[in-house]
Image (cartoon, rainbow, N blue to C red):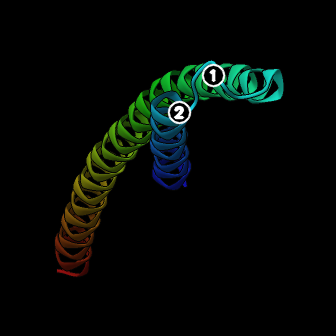
Amino acid sequence: MADLVNLQFQVCAKLFKLILAFGKRYINSSYSIMLYLNMGRMINAEIELNELLKSSEQLLIQCNFLRVQNICYVVYCAKKWKKMWHMKKVRMAKAKKKKEEDKEILAQFNATRES
Protein backbone atom coordinates (compact mmCIF):
# COMPACT_ATOMS: atom_id res chain seq x y z
CA MET A 1 0.00 0.00 0.00
CA ALA A 2 2.75 2.43 0.94
CA ASP A 3 4.67 1.56 -2.24
CA LEU A 4 1.59 2.37 -4.31
CA VAL A 5 1.12 5.77 -2.63
CA ASN A 6 4.79 6.55 -3.09
CA LEU A 7 4.58 5.62 -6.77
CA GLN A 8 1.54 7.88 -7.26
CA PHE A 9 3.38 10.79 -5.64
CA GLN A 10 6.36 10.22 -7.93
CA VAL A 11 4.13 10.15 -11.03
CA CYS A 12 2.41 13.40 -9.99
CA ALA A 13 5.78 15.04 -9.32
CA LYS A 14 7.01 14.03 -12.77
CA LEU A 15 3.85 15.42 -14.39
CA PHE A 16 4.20 18.75 -12.57
CA LYS A 17 7.83 19.00 -13.64
CA LEU A 18 6.87 18.37 -17.27
CA ILE A 19 4.08 20.96 -17.14
CA LEU A 20 6.37 23.52 -15.52
CA ALA A 21 9.09 22.89 -18.08
CA PHE A 22 6.56 23.39 -20.87
CA GLY A 23 5.22 26.56 -19.25
CA LYS A 24 8.67 28.03 -18.66
CA ARG A 25 9.66 27.30 -22.24
CA TYR A 26 6.63 28.85 -23.93
CA ILE A 27 5.48 31.59 -21.54
CA ASN A 28 7.22 34.92 -22.02
CA SER A 29 6.46 38.57 -21.33
CA SER A 30 4.02 38.87 -24.25
CA TYR A 31 1.39 36.73 -22.51
CA SER A 32 -1.15 38.01 -20.02
CA ILE A 33 -0.68 38.17 -16.26
CA MET A 34 -3.14 35.28 -15.79
CA LEU A 35 -0.62 32.85 -17.23
CA TYR A 36 1.93 34.02 -14.66
CA LEU A 37 -0.59 33.62 -11.85
CA ASN A 38 -1.40 30.10 -13.01
CA MET A 39 2.31 29.39 -13.31
CA GLY A 40 2.79 30.56 -9.71
CA ARG A 41 0.03 28.23 -8.57
CA MET A 42 1.62 25.36 -10.44
CA ILE A 43 5.02 26.12 -8.89
CA ASN A 44 3.42 26.16 -5.41
CA ALA A 45 1.69 22.87 -6.21
CA GLU A 46 5.01 21.37 -7.30
CA ILE A 47 6.67 22.54 -4.07
CA GLU A 48 3.88 21.00 -1.99
CA LEU A 49 4.05 17.80 -4.01
CA ASN A 50 7.81 17.59 -3.49
CA GLU A 51 7.27 18.00 0.27
CA LEU A 52 4.61 15.27 0.15
CA LEU A 53 7.01 13.07 -1.80
CA LYS A 54 9.70 13.51 0.86
CA SER A 55 7.22 12.78 3.65
CA SER A 56 5.90 9.74 1.77
CA GLU A 57 9.47 8.41 1.46
CA GLN A 58 9.91 8.86 5.21
CA LEU A 59 6.60 7.08 5.83
CA LEU A 60 7.71 4.28 3.53
CA ILE A 61 10.92 3.90 5.55
CA GLN A 62 8.86 3.77 8.75
CA CYS A 63 6.50 1.18 7.22
CA ASN A 64 9.47 -0.98 6.23
CA PHE A 65 10.85 -0.63 9.78
CA LEU A 66 7.49 -1.75 11.17
CA ARG A 67 7.54 -4.76 8.83
CA VAL A 68 11.01 -5.70 10.08
CA GLN A 69 9.85 -5.17 13.66
CA ASN A 70 6.86 -7.49 13.10
CA ILE A 71 9.08 -10.14 11.51
CA CYS A 72 11.48 -9.96 14.46
CA TYR A 73 8.57 -10.34 16.89
CA VAL A 74 7.25 -13.38 15.03
CA VAL A 75 10.70 -15.01 15.08
CA TYR A 76 11.05 -14.24 18.81
CA CYS A 77 7.63 -15.77 19.56
CA ALA A 78 8.44 -18.84 17.46
CA LYS A 79 11.71 -19.42 19.31
CA LYS A 80 10.00 -18.92 22.67
CA TRP A 81 7.21 -21.33 21.69
CA LYS A 82 9.75 -23.91 20.47
CA LYS A 83 11.69 -23.69 23.74
CA MET A 84 8.49 -23.99 25.78
CA TRP A 85 7.35 -27.00 23.71
CA HIS A 86 10.75 -28.68 24.13
CA MET A 87 10.64 -28.19 27.91
CA LYS A 88 7.11 -29.62 27.99
CA LYS A 89 8.27 -32.70 26.05
CA VAL A 90 11.20 -33.17 28.46
CA ARG A 91 8.89 -32.92 31.49
CA MET A 92 6.45 -35.40 29.94
CA ALA A 93 9.30 -37.85 29.22
CA LYS A 94 10.55 -37.55 32.81
CA ALA A 95 7.03 -38.08 34.16
CA LYS A 96 6.56 -41.16 31.95
CA LYS A 97 9.91 -42.59 33.04
CA LYS A 98 9.06 -41.98 36.72
CA LYS A 99 5.67 -43.62 36.28
CA GLU A 100 7.32 -46.71 34.74
CA GLU A 101 9.85 -46.84 37.58
CA ASP A 102 7.03 -46.57 40.13
CA LYS A 103 5.18 -49.43 38.42
CA GLU A 104 8.36 -51.52 38.46
CA ILE A 105 8.97 -50.82 42.16
CA LEU A 106 5.33 -51.61 42.96
CA ALA A 107 5.59 -54.89 41.00
CA GLN A 108 8.76 -55.82 42.91
CA PHE A 109 7.08 -54.95 46.21
CA ASN A 110 4.03 -57.07 45.36
CA ALA A 111 6.28 -59.94 44.28
CA THR A 112 8.24 -59.86 47.57
CA ARG A 113 5.05 -59.52 49.61
CA GLU A 114 3.43 -62.55 48.00
CA SER A 115 6.44 -64.78 48.48
Is residue 96 depicted above or below 16 in this figure? below
- The residue singled out by tag 2 in the image is 20
Which image quadrant is residue 42 in?
Answer: top right
Badge 1: few (under 14), some or many (20 or more) residues near its Cα, within 10 Å? some
Check disc 1 and report the residue beneath it. Answer: 43
Q: Is residue 81 left or right of residue 82?
A: right
Q: Position of residue 21 (x, y in %)?
A: 45, 34
Q: Which one is in front, 109 or 1?
A: 1
In the image, is 47 to the left or to the right of 22?
right
Inspect the image, locate mark 2, and give the three-letter code of the amino acid beneath it. Answer: Leu
Q: Residue at x 31, y 61 (%)?
A: 92
Q: Secondary structure at mark 2?
A: helix
Q: Would you say the residues marked 1 and 2 are in contact, meaning their CB atoms lie under 8 Å apart?
A: yes
Q: Is residue 49 left or right of residue 40?
A: left
In the rendered image, which quarter is residue 85 located in? bottom left
User: CA separation, marks 1 and 2?
Assistant: 7 Å
